[in-house]
């Protein structure tokens, strides 16, 4: 388990990594109304699944964002969801190419590997799994992504071409071709033969993580096999 | 639309309000004292303010308070109060009398986003932040207020995920224009959100309690998702920088789970992690929650664990279990059943 070892070793100087440094936005992409991808030049290495702390100016406390780009990508990218009454995301959404932002070096221990596993995400919670997918960890993965509308499945073309039938999009708010109509928790409930040997990675809102974790525990998946990242 | 409440405003905020009304700055302190020291709920009662200012305040603001909608009493005397919050949500507050002392366990959020595996509030998900007024109100409206000796932020929610309102609450509770409590009677408990914890340490003198539950990174990740981003080792490293134990009480909370975190290896791990720190350790019995894969360690094991830690030089106590029958005990607070479900994002 190379990743865990690296992270554990990194704990000692963990606090040193939190201070932010100035970076320049290389570009910002609108994926759908209210959902953006922000790209920077890469100045540090990271492990797929890690996060960075970002702020536009030092008057706003930094927020955490999962890196959604791969280890080999030239840019470091994050995916974010605009909260219209939030403090930071309205400012992030106003950024354009060449603007400075404050960003930490990557940190975090929600780390993937190349063993068979389940990647379960709601909304922008798909971000760390895209990073893992683009970093050579796609082998043996089943990906479940939940969203309210048919346009919630960010990076779906990449996921579809990599995982084919092992990429399940659960859409609770509308019917559309190729999508399971219902909440991702409903889809999980319907599965009666979940492997007890594979790891289940959960990422997204507290509500999703807690509900899916309960379902997995009910289905006798050991807690050793459940890894959760909550976007609090 | 209801007028905004002055209850829960700090002195600085009241100063801004009185300035906007064209009143002299010193009236802010008078208003704060009426609200927090004399507990009045009508502007008319602020008799040292000019009538015109009282009228202006009554036109634009309110200071009325709601009362608890429900109270349950445990066989051991613990009481659980249910207060309404905004948006059809509710919060719980636990009043725990112990001989001559009485502790109030206050909430800082409706639900919680942190998702700790052993906690009922965590299972509820997150429904909202409590305002400063809603936090203070749990103390102000308590029928037993005068008997309180301690306040602990250990109810629903992670206080440092609502830092601004928790800091303002501590300010109102301890200020001479506020309730005038000693910060040594107030403990804020956190799972260790590092940036917020740093702000708290540098700007408050209240006691701090950190939920550890296991000294090992890989194990803590399984029960507390926060460990992915703010690991306990980093939390302790930060605390060491401040040498907190000198000025105030630093404690570590440790819920004892059978065959998970109750071995001698854990005693060694805690000892290594906290080596040389001035702190105390509180061992807590686990109150099982539905569908939990965790069970409580036995009484005998908890005692042995305590002795093990004491032999390593740590001041260690076993927290008495209170209010279990009314679900007021540690980790059992939840108002999920009362919350109107919001449309989830999945
Ligand atoms: C480990 C981790 C990884 C994350 N990764 C991502 C990611 O990849 N992509 C992503 O989009 N997000 C991610 N997040 C969430 C992100 O960090 C921010 O919380 C999010 O973007 C909102 O930031 P904001 O400043 O705009 O909103 P905030 O100001 O934090 O507010 C968030 C919401 O809470 C409400 N709120 C805030 N304060 C109050 C209050 N006092 N009372 C009532 N309501 C209040 C606001 O109305 C708003 O809707 C992650 C979080 C964590 C912990
Ligand atoms: S233990 Fe505290 S931080 Fe964890 S879920 Fe419960 S209320 Fe939240």
Image: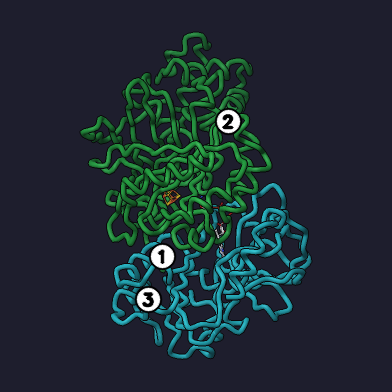
Chain colours: A cyan, B green
Residue B293 against residue A177 in the figure, above or below: above
Q: Residues within 10 Å of mark 3 (few under 14, many from 20)?
A: some
Q: Residue furthest front?
A: B311
x, y percent for residue A223: 40, 67
Q: Earlier in the sequence, mark 1 or mark 3?
A: 3
Question: What residue is drawn where x is 32% and y is 52%?
Answer: B296
Give the left or right position of residue B74, taking residue B50 as reference. left
Give the left or right position of residue B152, taking residue A81 as reference. left
* Quarter of the view holding residue B327: top left
Observer able to see residue B68? yes
- Distance CA(mark 3)–CA(mark 2): 55 Å
Please determine if labels 1 and 3 lie on a single subunit: yes
x, y percent for residue B256: 39, 50
What residue is disc 3 on? A174
Nearest to the eye among marks 1 and 3: give it. 1
What residue is disc 1 on? A208
Question: What residue is drawn where x is 35% and y is 70%?
Answer: A216
- Distance CA(mark 1)–CA(mark 3): 19 Å
Question: What residue is drawn where x is 48% and y is 40%?
Answer: B310
Residue A116 against residue B210 in the figure, above or below: below
Query: Who is closer to the viewer here, B26 or B121?
Result: B121
Question: Which numbered marker is on residue B248?
Answer: 2
Observer able to see residue B89? no
Nearest to the eye among marks 3 and 2: give it. 2
Contact? badges 3 and 2 (CB < 8 Å): no
User: Which element type, helix, strand or loop, lies under badge 2?
Assistant: loop
User: Which element type, helix, strand or loop, lies under badge 3?
Assistant: loop
Give the left or right position of residue B185, taking residue A68 as reference. left
């Amino acid at each position: 388990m190379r990743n865990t070892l690296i992270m554990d070793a990194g704990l000692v100087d963990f606090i040193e990594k939190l201070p932010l440094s100035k970076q320049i936005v290389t570009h910002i992409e609108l994926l759908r109304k209210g959902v953006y991808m922000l790209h920077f030049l890469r100045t540090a290495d990271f492990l797929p699944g890690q996060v960075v702390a970002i702020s536009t100016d030092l008057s706003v406390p930094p927020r955490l964002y999962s890196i959604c780009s791969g280890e080999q990508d030239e840019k470091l990218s994050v995916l974010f969801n605009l909260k219209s009454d939030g403090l930071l995301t309205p400012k992030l959404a106003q950024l354009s190419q060449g603007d400075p932002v404050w960003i930490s070096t990557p940190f975090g221990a929600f780390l993937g590997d190349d063993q068979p596993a389940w990647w379960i995400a709601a909304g922008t919670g798909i971000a760390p799994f895209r990073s893992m997918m683009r970093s050579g960890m796609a082998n043996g993965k089943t990906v479940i992504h939940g969203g309210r509308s048919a346009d919630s499945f960010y990076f779906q073309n990449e996921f579809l071409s990599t995982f084919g039938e092992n990429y399940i999009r659960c859409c609770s708010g509308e019917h559309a071709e190729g999508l399971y109509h219902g909440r991702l928790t409903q889809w999980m409930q319907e599965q009666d033969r979940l492997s007890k040997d594979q790891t289940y990675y959960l990422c997204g809102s507290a509500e999703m993580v807690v509900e899916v974790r309960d379902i997995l525990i009910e289905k006798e998946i050991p807690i050793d096999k459940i890894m959760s990242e909550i976007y609090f | 639309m209801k007028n905004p409440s002055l209850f829960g405003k700090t002195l600085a905020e009241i100063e801004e309000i009185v300035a906007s009304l064209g009143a002299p700055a010193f009236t802010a302190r008078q208003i704060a004292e009426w609200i927090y020291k004399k507990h009045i709920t009508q502007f008319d009662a602020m008799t040292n303010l000019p009538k015109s200012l009282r009228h202006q305040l009554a036109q634009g603001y309110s200071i009325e308070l709601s009362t608890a909608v429900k109270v349950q009493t445990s066989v051991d005397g613990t009481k659980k109060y249910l207060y309404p919050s905004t948006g059809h949500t509710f919060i719980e507050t636990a009043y725990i009398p112990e001989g001559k002392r009485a502790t109030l366990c206050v909430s800082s959020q409706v639900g919680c986003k942190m998702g700790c595996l052993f906690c009922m509030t965590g299972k509820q998900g997150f429904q909202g932040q409590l305002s400063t007024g809603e936090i203070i109100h749990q103390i102000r409206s308590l029928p037993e207020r005068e008997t309180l000796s301690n306040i602990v932020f250990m109810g629903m929610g992670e206080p440092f995920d609502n830092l601004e309102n928790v800091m303002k609450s501590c300010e109102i509770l301890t200020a001479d224009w506020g309730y005038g409590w000693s910060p040594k009677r107030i403990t804020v408990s956190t799972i260790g959100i590092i940036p917020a914890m740093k702000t708290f340490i540098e700007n408050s003198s209240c006691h701090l309690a950190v939920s550890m539950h296991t000294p090992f990174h890989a194990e803590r990740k399984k029960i507390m998702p926060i460990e992915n981003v703010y690991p306990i080792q980093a939390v302790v490293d930060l605390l060491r920088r401040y040498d907190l134990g000198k000025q105030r009480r630093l404690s570590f909370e440790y819920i004892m789970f059978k065959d998970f975190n109750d071995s001698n290896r854990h005693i060694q791990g805690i000892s290594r992690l906290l080596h040389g720190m001035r702190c105390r350790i509180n061992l807590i019995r686990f109150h099982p929650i539905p569908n939990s894969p965790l069970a409580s360690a036995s009484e005998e094991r908890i005692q042995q664990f305590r002795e093990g830690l004491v032999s390593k030089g740590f001041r260690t106590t076993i927290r008495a279990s209170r209010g279990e029958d009314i679900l007021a005990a540690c980790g059992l607070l939840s108002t999920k059943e009362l919350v109107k479900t919001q449309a989830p994002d999945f």
